[in-house]
Image (cartoon, grey):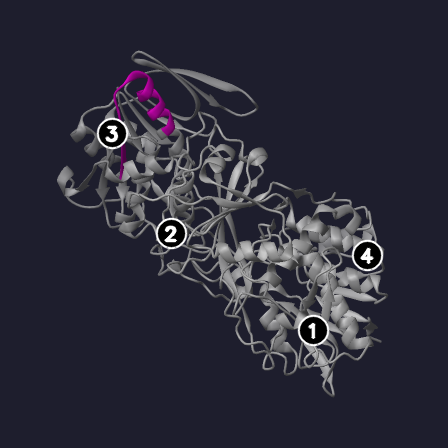
Amino acid sequence: MKIFVCIKSVPDTAATIKLSGESSFEDSDCKFVINPYDEYGIEEAVTLVEKNGGEVVVITAGRASADGALRSAMAIGANRAIHVKTEEQFLDSSFTAKVLKAAIERDGMPDIIFTGKNSVDTEGFQTPYRLAAELGFPVVNEISKLKINGDKAVAEREIGGGDREVLEISLPAVIGVTKGLNEPRYPKFPDIMKAKKKPVNLITISDLGIDELFSKSRLVKLESAPERSGAKMIQGSVEAQVKELIRILKEDEKVL
Amino acid sequence: MNKKYDAIIIGAGVIGCPIAYELCKMGYKTLNVDKNPDAGEGSTAGSCAIVRAHYSTADGVAMAYEGFKYWLDWENYLDHVKDEKGLAKYMNTGSLLLKSEGHDWKKVKKNYDEVGVKYEEWDNEKIKQMIPPIDLHKFWPVTRPEDPKFYDEPTEMLEGGIFCPEGGYMNDPALSAHNIMRATEAKGGQFIFNAEVVSIRSENGRVVGITLKDGTQIDSPIVVNVGGPHSFKVNKMAEGVWEGCNIKTKALRHEVMYCPSPDDYDYLNKGYHMSDGDIACYSRPEVGNTFLIGSEDPKCDPQEWVDPDEFYAGKGGPGRDNQLTEAQWKAQCYRWAKRIPTLPVPNQPKGVVDLYDCSDDWIPIYDKSDLNGFYMAVGTSGNQYKNAPVVGRMMAELINACERQGLEHDKTPFQFKYQYTGRVMNVGFFSRKRAINKNSSFSVNG
């Protein structure tokens, strides 16, 4: 069984992001982690391979700093990694999907491709679908329960209101995963040491026959979220408080 | 008319609250002011709240050992006050100091003997029996994961440790300060929160009161600086105080990490507080069966001195704000993973970043100042949580001796008698005028 897991190196959601220029941020000191949803995919892939044999290949497209995320994935148990090195801070998901497709085809077709349901930085929810379209594979997303039966998979997803949708799909397929699927294991120090020595195949987009970066969308501007101002306590009787609140909403905040 | 108090205490953390508590018991009408929303919500909340006796000086050991008695008898200390949030709990795990080149453990042992601290010497076999997942190889000297030497295979073994059965930790440091606040209120003390002091007023060489950010003036002939990491800013507000200190304080950024315990080890219920100078880390159990891993400031680690206001606002920038850094996460977790080789190290870092109010020699300043009526309990350097109730009593007696009995503490230092151990402490040891104490470990170990 050969399983690919597509991962993304993203800023830790707790990190303080400092913007630089119109549409980028300073990333030299920023703390990066594996996109948390991708960890469910890595855990699922490693568990399947432990049970059935085969190999887990993690793949990413991104800057040199994404190596840290690949090493973390291999510390969880992935066997090797492919890093398509790019210089851009943000990649358009149509471009990412093309790059991933080319790199996966070049390496040899898998039985399953896992992705996280989305990435926590851009939250585009695009890459799994676009990758599947490029490859001509079926795709399911937000999967929190999965069973593999030969060349079929039975996947479950929550569709709101406590209801679950059960889907049967033929393999190979792209499967986007989310919380609840498993508990990603924590690597131990010896695993981290072993991961340092596992192979990372570093390639460029021209190695994949892609001549230049293209995008269907363009990042125009990044802005910091406005700072939260302190809470304001309204004093007085209930009637006076309500009156004052309505006045604030109408006159000061202009939301009514 | 300005409100008047006998004493104003700036800060309502785990040191500010017991000072007020003890002054109230002596009949002073006190007010604690704090810029945070509740007691213990400043750097107290980020404390590991470890209660251990090993210090590099006999006086340090004696004070910590005296403190044990308060924590072990918490309800009595609080005079059985009710706190709607419940009472903090002393987790009496015992405390293990591994013998290593990173600690002057021979001095600690001598200090234990001098003070009468109960302890046992454990050899490696005994340690292994008590802590099954431990690896007792010697990893000295301390290095960082960026250094290839970090990964050298160890060949020698450590030589056992010193176990102190009365050690442990308080399970909720912020709550412990809150408990003391409620006990203080029961004795008549008052507290105001979300109140930032912007000036300290004085007339004719004597403090007369404080002014808050909203313009409120409050008067008192006694003001005590217990501002934690903000202490140097508060000292600078009071006329001549900063200039009159030979030992200064500043805010040092510190990170503490959480790693889960290995599956087959119940660290929460069966583990000990451990100090490990060989890898410059300490740890204690935390809820969820996790290791809480702190650093003992090895020389190879960078020190970040920061502005406390920028830090708490999250504005200092990476490595200077209140978010964990990847480099330090790896340094502390990987070091501890050498000691506990089956330690799981999550890919997504979790921990606490807070500030030490650090003095030049990592020994606190418990003293009067060059401004009459202005006192300070500052420079706690990450190692005074355990002493808080003792410091409360000592500061209150010092203030009372100076204010009501005419003691000239700078000339004839106040002698404080410990209630439980009976030992007498020369409070001049903590003087702002002292030369740097060369006996100090110059680290969180104190």
Residue at the spot of label 2: B327
Location of residue B369 with respect to A32 vertically, above or below: below
Number of the label disc, if any, that sits on residue B185: 4
Which chain does the numbered disc 2 sit on? B
- Is label 1 or label 2 in front? 1
Q: Three-letter amino acid code at disc 2?
A: Ala
Q: CA distance from mark 1 to mark 2?
A: 39 Å
Image quarter of residue B413: bottom right
Mark 4 closeness class: few <14, some 14–19, many ≥20 residues within 10 Å: some
**Residue B420 numbered tag:** none
- Residue in the foreground of this view, choosing between A152 and A126: A152
Q: Nearer the viewer, mark 1 or mark 3?
A: 1
Which chain's residue wears label 4? Answer: B
- The mark lying in front, picked from 4 and 3, is 4
Decide which of B436, B312 is in the foreground and name it: B436
Q: Secondary structure at mark 3?
A: helix
Q: Which mark sits nearer the N-terminus, 2 or 4?
A: 4
Is the residue A181 above or below the residue B230 in the image? above
Q: Which residue is mark 1?
A: B375
Q: Residues within 10 Å of mark 3 (few under 14, many from 20)?
A: some
**Callout 1, which amino acid?**
Tyr
The CA span between labels 4 and 3 is 69 Å
Which subunit holds the residue at mark 1? B
Which of marks 1 and 4 precedes in the sequence? Answer: 4
Chain designation of label 3? A
Find the magenta span and give its range. A43-60
